[in-house]
Amino acid sequence: MAVNFNNYRQVQQQLEPYHARLVAVSKTKPVEDIRELYTAGQRIFGENYVQEMVEKAGLLPEDVQWHFIGHLQSNKVKYIAPFVSMIHGVDSLKLLSEISKQALKHKRVIDCLLQVHIATEETKFGLDETELFQLLDQAGSLSGIRITGLMGMASNTDDETQIRKEFAGLKILRDTIWEKYFPGTAFFKELSTGMSGDYKLALEEGSTLVRIGSLLFGARNYA
Ligand SMILES: *Cc1c(COP(=O)(O)O)cnc(C)c1O
């Protein structure tokens, strides 16, 4: 399956007026596909399996920015800590502490996004609002990490009003946190929202990082 460059260019054009960035979600896709998109100028790639990301990182240029977008287990942080540039799905102090510890070990700073549960489905990961503020209070003393914003996944529905409401709610939450913890700074501005099916809504609702896979690389086959 080859890369869909028409879609790639289209997505790029749609991002431009919003100054948002594209995380090309390459999970399950071969290294050759990533290389094709890399050659076209794409640098941020998203993966959600640790082993797969480690293997791919070893085969691709150093200036690829690897974003881990899946649910990360604390005991696996050590494998990606040497090179990962951003971790999108952080939802516990335990995980954040481990990222901090491993980042310091490698003399690095790893950007993290806190994942908030915004969907109606029960199954998805993420913090509720109370847990989010608790975690922010507890995380203040950790070094080796920077919490640069929030990440969320909207409900899996065709109801655009619902999706928009969930994205908008996350933006309000980010702005509230910014005002409380980082007023007047350029910090804590990231909003990782939007996938192939809902990224246009996400952009309209303030996304700064869209995570797009199937639109660029084709549908995924899970054996
Ligand atoms: C797979 C995945 C995506 C990309 O999904 P598409 O619908 O293929 O664009 C985005 N975010 C997360 C967290 C994912 O796991």
Image (tube, rainbow, N blue to C red):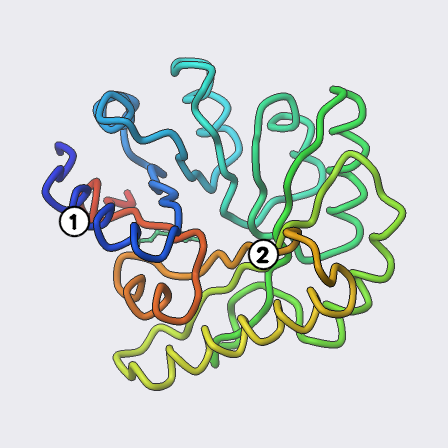
Residue 189 badge? 2
Q: Considering the image in quadrants, where does the N terminus appear?
A: top left
Amino acid type shown at disc 2 = Lys
Q: Considering the image in quadrants, where does the C terminus appear?
A: top left
Secondary structure of residue under mark 2: loop
Left or right: 80, with 212 as reference point: right
Q: Residue at x 66, y 68 (%)?
A: 127
Residue 20 drawn at (x, y percent): 39, 51
On screen, 195 above or below 129?
above
Q: Residues within 10 Å of mark 1 (few under 14, many from 20)?
A: few
Residue 126 drawn at (x, y percent): 61, 65
Q: Is mark 2 within 8 Å of ligand 1?
A: no
Observer-nearest residue: 20 or 115?
20
User: Label 1 to label 2, Cα distance in Å?
Assistant: 25 Å
Residue at image mark 1:
10
Q: Residue at x 75, y 46 (%)?
A: 96
Amino acid type shown at disc 1 = Gln
Location of residue 34 (image quadrant): top left
